[in-house]
Image (tube, rainbow, N blue to C red):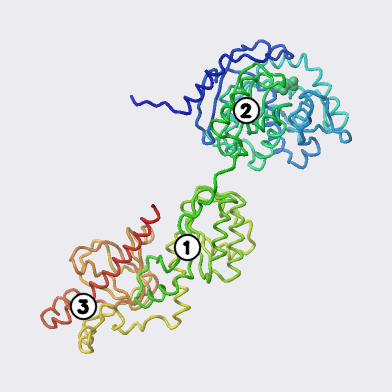
Amino acid sequence: MPDRRSPIQDFLELIHARYADFREGEVATYIPELANANPESFGICVATADGFVYEVGDSRQEFTIQSISKPFVYGLALDERGPEHMFTKVGVEPSGDAFNAISLHKTSGCPLNPMINAGAIATTGQIGASPPEPCFERILEMFSRYTGHAMHVDEAVYESESLTGHRNRAIGHLLRNFDVLEGDPTAAVDTYFRQCAISVNCVDLALMGATLANQGINPLTGTRAIKDTHVRSVLSVMASCGMYDFSGGWIYNVGMPAKSGVAGGVVAVLAGQLGIGVYSPRLDAQGNSARALQVCRELSQAWQLHQFNPPFCAHTSRRMRCTGEERHSSRIRHPTERACLGEHGGQIHLFEIQGNLAFATVEPIIRDVVRCTGRRGVILDFHHVTGINHVASQLLADLADALSHQGTAIFFTSTQQLPLLRQEVGSHLADASVIDRLFRFRSTDAALEWCEDELLRELMPAGPLTVNDLRLFEIASGLADEELGVFSGLITRRPYAPGDYVIRRGDEATSLFLVTKGIVGVWLGDHESGKRVASFSVGTMVGEMAFLDGARRSANVVAEGDVECAVFELEDFNRLLESHPQLHTTILRNIGVSLATKLRKVNEDVRILIAERQ
Ligand code: GLU
């Protein structure tokens, strides 16, 4: 049996053992039912932003959520009523007063933040208030989206707080007095009591944290619990006001947005990374679980979880950069075209990007693209991009817009896995033609081929060849006039309509094709459904491999548009051995040279691929 122990699990167990005998603090008693908690209970759970759960101790022990409900209900209120409305009801400033202080803004009467009771009751009063509906159900549903299972209320704790919560009732009435609460304050306070009595365990808390860490989506169920745009608002109030009067010390030492409750629970969140849930009912003088505080401090130090630790340097988003001089598309071209691209291909720039794109990772790419000199074509390949945020998408859209209007053709390729990019570019740019052009090619090879064609069209306006002149084909290189006459006599011209097969995979090889008009594509599998692996322009030769070794055709070759080929039969070639041995030898050598050129191109592609991986 392999040892499956994880150093992460080991460390949690070590921390749990280290604080097992730590007995500082007192269990809360002002809600009588809370006094019944077992002071020894102690659980820890860490849930990663992709939903892996580590747990130790009493991590499944149920307790009431209490004030930990506050930031989550605030998130629900932001979702339901919008931030502007919520700002008219409750602020976001730390109060410096106790959680249950009757502290309202001097003139507006608004509570200072949603983490003190006054702010939380004002927030709860906004849930489902318009149109009226059973708002507590909405709160319970919201929590089940975070935890991934149905939630329930600990009725004994609810009853207990309902019987004794006169101070909170007073706060409710004051809020009504200032019109912060518009309806019946008793209903808002009652709903608040119920939300505080929702039963949770450490795993629930850690998953709630992991959901916030994962941009508001529960990583185990894939359900969205809160709009992504409101996650940071919730984390902000947790960071500034989440730990009662220790909020400043907490963010200084532990550095994670967090919230604690009087039952002894704490949830902490590190955006993008993890959620932590700790339970231990003994509270310190500020009302925070004394053990949870130690545990979170230790975890933060050991795993460097402080959110203000400098992030890793992000300049790794450029995976590869080259020009059209160094890298060519899979189109096989005539030597004159190859020479032209060799000389001017530097005007085509190709970037392969990788990783997660946010401001800091997309900025170096934008900087490089803007600095490319003499750029005619720019291709950004997103194949290795794992994620992209709004701002990176918008900056790239602006870049594409600016370059397009300067006359540079810019393409985003391999974007199929990044729907947000397409969506953001679509809503950010007004010019539909820029958008269409940007996403026109799925593959980098197709975009590169297009850029090469454009460059050649411009630099060789008359076209590279007179198609009827067989002398321009590599196969005829070095032939004397008389030999060319013999060779031409053996050639038959054959036209093809778009989509016609020039060569079929598996066929016997009986002829060689010289492309005299149009382009032919080489397909593995069927034309359309298979994969186009190469193509041939006017002036190139197709099918010589099987022509030489007699093997069956290995791929399909299909006409792209109207095509004409000059066809040279194997039989005729063989006959030349007797009738014109010198001509036969020259043709054979020319075929060899052509194959060597193709092999060199393949070697170059392989070299680039290998270099990329080193
Ligand atoms: N229901 C509790 C109260 O309002 C919550 C207090 C807390 O956890 O901070 O008193």
Q: Which residue is mark 2?
A: 267
Q: Which residue is mark 3?
A: 587
Label 3 SS: helix
Q: Quadrant of residue 60?
A: top right
Judge left or right: residue 575 versus residue 524.
left
Within 10 angstroms of label 1, few (less than 14), some, or many (20 or more) residues? Answer: many
Label 3 to label 2: alpha-carbon separation: 78 Å
Nearest the eye: 39 or 552: 39
- Give the quarter of the figure containing the N terminus: top left
Q: Which residue is mark 1?
A: 350
Q: Which numbered disc, 3 or 1, marks the residue closer to the eye?
A: 1
Label 2 to label 1: alpha-carbon separation: 46 Å
Furthest residue in direction left, as rendered: 578
Q: Name the N-terminal-most of marks 2 and 1.
A: 2
Judge left or right: residue 84 versus residue 566.
right
Q: Name the N-terminal-most of marks 3 and 1.
A: 1
Q: Is residue 368 placed above or below 224 in the rendered structure?
A: below
**Ligand 1 image position (quadrant):** top right
* Residue 57 location (% of width, % of height): 53, 18
Q: Which numbered disc, 3 or 2, marks the residue closer to the eye?
A: 2
Q: Is residue 174 visible?
A: yes
Nearest the eye: 391 or 24: 24
Q: Which mark is residue 380?
A: none
